[in-house]
Image: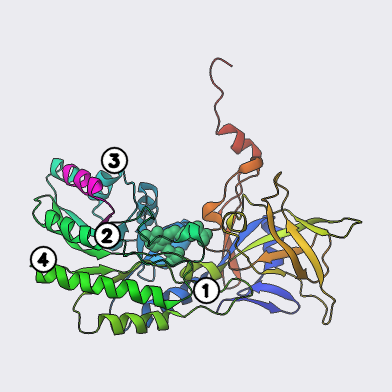
Amino acid sequence: MNHFEVRRGELWCEDTPLAAIAEAVGTPAYVYSTATLERHYTVFRDAFAPREVLVAYAVKANSNLSVLKTLAALGAGADTVSEGEVRRALAAGVPPSRIVFSGVGKTDDELAFALDVGVAEINIESEPEMDRLAAVAESKDMRAPIAIRVNPDVGAGGHAKIATGKTEDKFGVSLSEAERLYAKASNSASLKPLGVACHIGSQITDLAPLEAAFTKMRALVERLRLAGHSVRRLDLGGGLGVPYFNMPDPPPPAALAEVVDRVMAGLDIELAFEPGRLIVANAGVLLSRVIHVHRRPEGRAFLVLDAAMNDLIRPAMYDAYHDIRPVKAPAPGAALELYDVVGPICETGDTFTRDRSLPPLAAGDLVAFMSAGAYGSAMSSEYNTRPLVPEVLVRGDQFAVVRPRPTYDEMLAREPMAPWL
Ligand code: LLP
């Protein structure tokens, strides 16, 4: 459920017409709905009630400070993967006690920073990383709170590039290695093992692989406890998918919670989750204007938009399909036309979709890419020297620009000329 709907013949975000935002801010622009962010976060959290779980929102999905602050105000934690993301989470008011620091290649400097600010848990992905963290913590005379990230060898995810749970993927250590590393960490004066973690992929639309992974994780916790270790926390990652375009609805958080309850029945442990996409995807759209329609006499019609792959790279990168809706609702019964929807960037990869049935569109019309709140602006760039796409947050009938579009002067000023030129 989200708060983008047609009212009086056009698409609104909450109580604000998208056309008014396009008028004020220009296009392309991302638009986020506060009510949808809040709803998704609370539905996820409440699915596990009465269990109190740590919902560490995966900052990478959408790291805008206003988005983070909206979630932090509801009590969200943060799953972070770089010093930059930790800094964002702190700046948005997420307490360090709810920050998890993950990632396969955290540098010594980043680990030292995480220790200094007191993050709750550093997810260790390999032995060399654990050894480096132990050395950094020792040099500060501290004990680093860690969880071992396990790669449970279960494949899942909407695309090979976002599956993370198989042995051949770079993430985490095997179940047996986890036992060895846990024991090693328990014997270290500078490490404090809190628990174990897994995250097997993203855009997962089937609960079976999650259940398989969770079952392996429970057995691991039991083996570790049997061996005399204290295991306080189990971090089950993120990954639950969202409906994009022409697909059945993926299982809701309640169905995930039901699996968790069944698999974890009788196990006394703190649970943590790291959802990203599920919280923000359907809370955001990418608003774009039609530059023109190029009809080839031979047949194809190219809908050329002012948004491009630098603004939304998911179709080019993961063959993703986003629903594309005209902002002005078509006349009832309007015949549909087939369009190849493209951006202005100079490569064929800059094609959002081919042969998409849409109502007739013309230069100047607005369209919205739906479900673009996750991994949209967060992955945007200035390729082709296109200004970084702005972001707008809506709350009821108010909206605010929460990341402005840079001016060309600002963009050029970021690059000092080499002194010999
Ligand atoms: N935790 C860890 C350790 C992760 O690596 C990720 C995502 C998450 C949590 C959040 O997963 P989510 O709940 O959002 O599925 N750019 C890609 C998605 C990459 C996901 C990377 N890891 C896309 O646009 O589909």
Q: Is residue 407 left or right of residue 207?
A: right
Tags 2 and 4 touching, CB below 8 Å: no
Which quadrant of the figure shows ligand 1? bottom left
> Which residue is drawn at the image coordinates 22% and 73% (left, top)?
219
Between the residue at mark 2 and the residue at mark 1, the CA separation in whole angstroms equals 37 Å
Quadrant showing the N terminus? bottom right
Task: Find the magenta span and give its range.
Answer: 121-135
User: Which labelled disc corresponds to residue 109?
Assistant: 3
Q: Which residue is mark 1?
A: 36
Q: Earlier in the sequence, mark 1 or mark 3?
A: 1
Picture quarter containing residue 335? bottom right
Q: Which residue is mark 2?
A: 174
Between the residue at mark 3 and the residue at mark 4, the CA separation in whole angstroms equals 29 Å
Looking at the image, residue 390 lies above or below residue 368: above
User: Which labelled disc corresponds to residue 229?
Assistant: 4
Label 2 element class? loop
* Residue 42 drawn at (x, y percent): 41, 77
Between the residue at mark 1 and the residue at mark 4, the CA separation in whole angstroms equals 41 Å
